[in-house]
């Protein structure tokens, strides 16, 4: 059995139209928002506005709040800029989120799914930790980190 692939994408500094074109070009049918709070100061990236514009393009939207970075970890990271510290704390958080991870694995099997978060660099974002954990659980195979406007 072939495991489903998974995409990830951050919207940091991304023009909304270019962001949407990246999703379309990559064949995304479901965008899974992994932000704990699906709000943004950037126009078009808050939950309702984003869900509406995605729907217009035939892309489903799902917010999996349970996979967001807990506020205490976000605060520690803002102060320390220590991604290792964030990684350790987030792994502990993920260990308590089996149901959400299973749901995400099911969604990835049913859709061309893409994880959304803010950071442009997946190596500095919890979405890469989610993707890796899904691979470890055998729920997804290949993971491709998209870049707005880049190949995909």
Image (cartoon, rainbow, N blue to C red):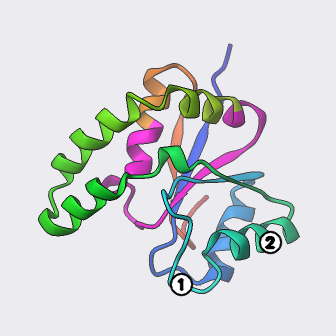
Residue that mark 1 sits on: 42
Residue that mark 2 sits on: 52
- Residue 147 placement, left or right of 24: left
- Residue 66 placement, left or right of 26: left
- Residue 3 placement, left or right of 8: right
| Quadrant assignment for the N terminus | top right
Quarter of the image where one finds residue 96: top left
Q: Which residues are magenta?
A: 107-131
Q: Nearer the viewer, residue 55 or 27?
A: 55
| Quadrant assignment for the C terminus | bottom right
Tell me the element at label 1.
loop
Q: Nearer the viewer, residue 65 or 101?
A: 65
Q: Nearer the viewer, residue 95 or 2?
A: 95
Image x and y of residue 22, in percent: 65, 67
Asked if the residue under mark 1 is in contact with the one under mark 2, i.e. CB atoms within 8 Å, the reply is no
Image x and y of residue 127, in percent: 44, 49
Q: Say whether disc 2 or disc 1 marks the residue closer to the N-terminus.
A: 1
């Amino acid at each position: 059995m072939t495991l489903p692939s998974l995409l990830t994408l951050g919207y940091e500094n991304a023009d909304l139209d270019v962001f949407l074109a990246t999703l379309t070009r990559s064949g995304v049918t479901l965008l899974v928002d992994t932000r704990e709070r699906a709000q943004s100061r950037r126009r078009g990236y808050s939950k309702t506005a984003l869900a509406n514009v995605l729907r217009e393009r035939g892309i489903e939207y799902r917010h999996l709040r349970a996979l967001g970075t807990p506020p205490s970890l976000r605060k520690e990271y803002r102060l320390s800029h220590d991604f290792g510290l964030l990684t350790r704390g987030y792994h502990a958080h993920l260990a308590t989120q089996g149901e959400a991870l299973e749901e995400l694995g099911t969604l990835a099997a049913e859709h061309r799914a893409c994880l959304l978060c803010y950071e442009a660099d997946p190596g500095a974002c919890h979405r890469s930790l989610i993707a890796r954990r899904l691979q470890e659980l055998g729920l997804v195979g290949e993971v491709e980190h998209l870049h707005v406007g880049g190949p995909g």
